[in-house]
Amino acid sequence: MNDIKNIIFDLGGVVIDLDRLSAVAAYRELGYTGAAEALGEYGQKWPFLPLEEGKFTAAEFFDTLRPMCRPGISDIQMQDAFEAFLTGIPVERLHRIEELRRAGFRLYVLSNTNAVMYHGWIAREFRKAGRSINDYFDGIVTSFEEGMCKPEPELFRIVTRRYGLEPGNTIMLDDSEANCGGARAAGLHAVRIDNQGADSMLSVTSFLLENPPLR
């Protein structure tokens, strides 16, 4: 990894802390009992998967989910329950991203996410520091905008083609081993992040900072 010039970050589980059980409990409060099966740590099922693949608009997602909840549940309540999956962005991770950019790395996002979370909680959370998500990264690719999800190797190729990245000089940081496999199939380096010990986002990026790109 001594020749890494480009770092691609997953959002959930790498930059953003997750709490799947909180979302499951929040949906249970709304009367939807299928969230435990439909909401996975690393991948979603119906009706969440079509939203992440961009096949549902937010309105279509809410209209699909509403009959599974108690009568009278609003779109806002369903959105709040979904966003309970996301718990926060530790400030030290934002500082690390800034440090990596100063060191000369080009930084990107590739995330399996959806319009509800991306334009809602994620946008608000980044703005808390007075900057938008676009201020931290050189480019962002999302599953809902591309119509496919990781670990599909083509999604990683979209990132490298769009931003002119050499796969051999690029590393993907993701909390899913399957997604890391998709990155490797597209010719990228990849490290599974668990945010503990030597495999945490801060530890892995500390190593990268010891080997900054040649200017």
Image (cartoon, rainbow, N blue to C red):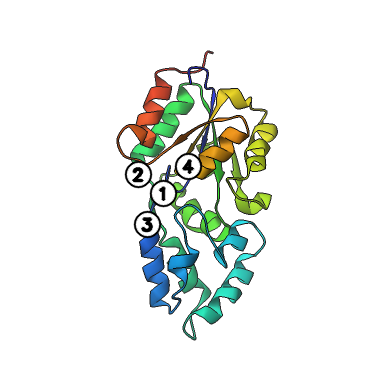
Q: Residue at x 46, y 66 (%)?
A: 37
Left or right of 196 on screen, residue 189: right
CA–CA distance in space, label 2 to label 3: 14 Å
Residue type pointed to by label 4: Glu
Q: Are marks 3 and 1 in contact (CB under 8 Å)?
A: no
Question: Which residue in the rendered view is the most extreme toward the bottom?
Answer: 71
171 shown above or below 18 = above
**Cα distance, mark 2 to mark 1?**
12 Å
Residue 111 placement (x, y as % from top left)? 54, 46
Q: Nearer the viewer, mark 4 or mark 3?
A: 4
Badge 4 or badge 3: first in the primary sequence: 3
Q: Which mark is residue 177?
A: 4
Q: Quadrant of residue 24?
A: bottom left
Question: Secondary structure under badge 4?
Answer: helix
Q: Look at the picture and state if 188 lies above or below 133.
A: above
In the rendered image, which residue does mark 1 sit on? 128
Which residue lies under the disc numbered 3?
A: 19
Q: Can you identify the residue that label 2 sits on? A: 90
Residue type highlighted by circle 3? Asp
